[in-house]
Amino acid sequence: MEPIVSLKPLLALLAALIGAILVMLAGRYPNLREAWSLIAAVVMFSLIVSMVPVILAGQTMVYQLFQILPGVSVTLRVDAFSLVFALAASFLWILTVFYSAGYMRGLQEHAQTRFNTCFALALFGAMGVAFADNLFTLYLFYEIVSIGTYPLVAHHQDRDGYEGGRKYMVYLIAAAKGLVLPAMILIYVLTGTLDFADNISSGILPDNANALLVTVLYALCIIGFAKNGLMPLHGWLPGAMVAPTPVSALLHAVAVVKVGVFCTTRVMLYVFGVDIMDELSLGIITAYFVSFTILVASIIALSKDDLKARLAYSTVSQLAYIILGVALLTPMAIEGGLIHIVNHAFAKITLFFCAGAIYVAAHKKKISEMGGLGRIMPFTFGAFAIASLSMIGVPPVAGFVTKWYLLIGSLDAAQVGIILVLMVSTMLNVAYFAPITYHAFFGKPPAGETRVAGIREAPLVMVVPIMIAALISVIIGIYPNFMMQFVKMVTG
């Protein structure tokens, strides 16, 4: 079936880009600035939703901006895989606009215009990645995300902010330029094109390609897309936690790390393909490689008393589930991995939103200082509990769907070792999430500290997005079929 040429993918990107410009121009007028952010987010989400019927009908939408060389162009394509990421990220941008307004104003943060402008630019880059039709376009927008989010990481403009921002740029841009760019050039030399394959089976590499060369190219891509948070190139992610909490939510749930795993899995499936990965045993090697990240990051999370640091290492671990599922190469496992892009997004943004609300309301960052806070902030900590259950994989919250598919997929692949990894990691999830909720609701304040009577829930403009995100985690856990239909279209 021939793809449909449509301006809609470009318009969705322009909604964020034009929104960024309008936010910058409205800098002296806070209400107008945030109104433009909201309008841009709603327009982008509406355009993406309008593409759903076309994709569900089995068609794809494309729009070529320009061609550089034969087989190398800047072209946008919307398919089922694109919408898995795009629908979640664009909807969560709407929630984040409201939440950010309450957070940034509540703490009277500086440079709010720059913050909102860069936020919109990050979504522009993320949607470009989602809609990339080829490896060149993917790489281009991947770099735009890196550059656009640096001011967000270094937002506080202090020593920690600059250090976190420096690490962020060195890890991400150096890895992309030093590893992905050479791989991309070699792939073009081998194939004469950078266009993604039409399905996940064959990939684009020739059948007679040297096995060692293919393996090296594969390793360069997997490691080079360092936004995926895989160890050992994960250090930028905890370092970026010096940024304001809405930025952490953007990094972990909406854009940056999801861009990393999206790029990684898109290349695994549509450049290398299931057949060649299976033939060269690249899939199972990758599965055990990322299993190390899943377990070690969870163990490190256990040692962190700072809430955002614990959530950061949780993200490192949870992202690896996505790549693990794809690496197992069975349909159920691939579906479990890809649906975790959505399931993790809603749960993790809830957790970071809660961390920000706790800081705004009580100025607490450390878990050990949150004893009894759940009785004062029941909505915030109730949402935190729901999102934690999703991360653990407890029904009926969304994370259960992920782990169910991953377990079945592991059985289909006859990988008992991976099943053990999933079981151990789930116990570790319980170990670093459950005590937070228990301590908040049933614990006591730190010794010598009494609760200030004025502490209460964060502003409504923050609590409402938290509750919506938590509720959606439950809804997509009970009714997963809407998003699963896109995932199943990927596996055929």
Image (cartoon, rainbow, N blue to C red):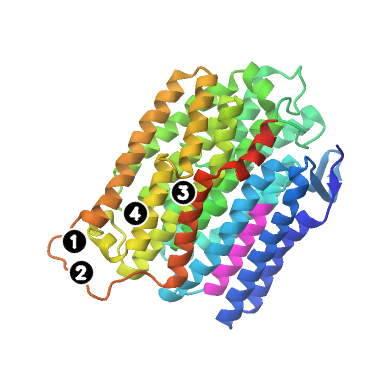
Task: Name the mark nearer the viewer: 2 or 3.
Answer: 2
Residue type highlighted by circle 4 = Leu
Tell me if label 4 and label 3 are in contact, CB under 8 Å.
no
Q: Tell me which label, 4 or 3, sits earlier in the chain.
A: 3
Q: Secondary structure at mark 4?
A: helix
Residue type highlighted by circle 2 = Arg
Magenta segment, principal secondary structure? Answer: helix
Give the extent of the magenta segment: 112-127
Q: Tell me which label, 3 or 1, sits earlier in the chain.
A: 3
- Residue at 78%, 47% (x, y): give it: 54
Q: Residues within 10 Å of mark 4 (few under 14, many from 20)?
A: many
Which of the pair 304/389 is nearer the observer?
A: 389
Image quadrant assignment for residue 240: bottom left
Tell me if label 2 and label 1 are in contact, CB under 8 Å.
yes
Gap between marks 3 and 1 measured at Cα: 30 Å
Q: Is residue 462 above or below residue 310?
A: below
Which of the pair 122/470 is nearer the observer?
A: 470
Residue that badge 1 annotates: 445
Residue that badge 2 annotates: 451
Residue type highlighted by circle 1 = Pro
Residue that badge 4 annotates: 307
Residue that badge 3 annotates: 237
- Residue at 72%, 40% (x, y): give it: 135
